[in-house]
Amino acid sequence: PLRKLSRNERFIGPAAHLAEMGAKYDALLGGIEMCLRFQNVEGDEESFELAKILKENSSSDATEKITGLERDHKLFPAVEEVVKKVQA
């Protein structure tokens, strides 16, 4: 899941592009949440690393580490809210 959540990959890349254009990206937030919930799955080392990042970091630090988004990016607050939800 980590690669899929990186800055230029499947979920964050298109959502960031839409946010930069001022378009709606809400539909992608659900997919981002599902990727964030894919944790501690046997046979998937990235899922263990994701769980560790989410557990050991604040929501803003985790969002930055996982997605590579800059904190001042238009998409950052929305993704951070999803991260907070998953961390709860």
Image (spheres, rainbow, N blue to C red):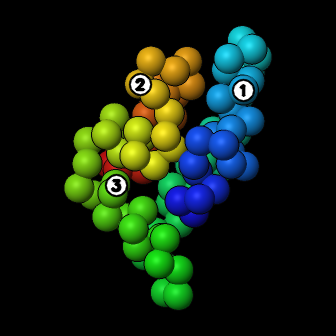
Helix, strand or loop at label 1? It is helix
Reading the image, the residue beneath label 1 is: 17
Q: Residue 15, located in which quarter of the rendered image?
A: top right
Which amino acid does the dot numbered 1 rest on? His
Residue carrying label 2: 71
Q: Quadrant of the N terminus?
A: bottom right
Which class describes the residues within 10 Å of circle 3: few (<14), some (14-19), or many (20+)?
A: many
Amino acid bearing label 2: Arg
For disc 3, the marked residue is 54
- Mark 3 or 2: in front is 2
Q: Residues within 10 Å of mark 2 (few under 14, many from 20)?
A: some
Secondary element at tag 2: loop
Q: Are marks 1 and 3 in contact (CB under 8 Å)?
A: no
Q: CA distance from mark 1 to mark 3?
A: 24 Å
Are circles 2 and 1 on residues that touch, CB within 8 Å? no
Res. 26 visible in picture: no
Is 41 above or below relative to 56? below
In the drawing, what numbered circle is on residue 33?
A: none
Marks 3/2: CA–CA distance: 17 Å
Between the residue at mark 2 and the residue at mark 1, the CA separation in whole angstroms equals 15 Å
Query: For this rendering, which residue is in front, 26 or 58?
Result: 58
Left or right position of 61 against 64: left
Asked whether the residues under the numbered discs 3 and 2 touch, taking CB atoms below 8 Å apart as contact, a structural biologist would say: no
Residue 25 located left or right of residue 65: right
Q: Is residue 35 above or below residue 63?
A: below
The x and y percentages for residue 20 are 68, 17
Dot 2 or dot 1, earlier in sequence: 1
Q: Earlier in the sequence, mark 1 or mark 3?
A: 1
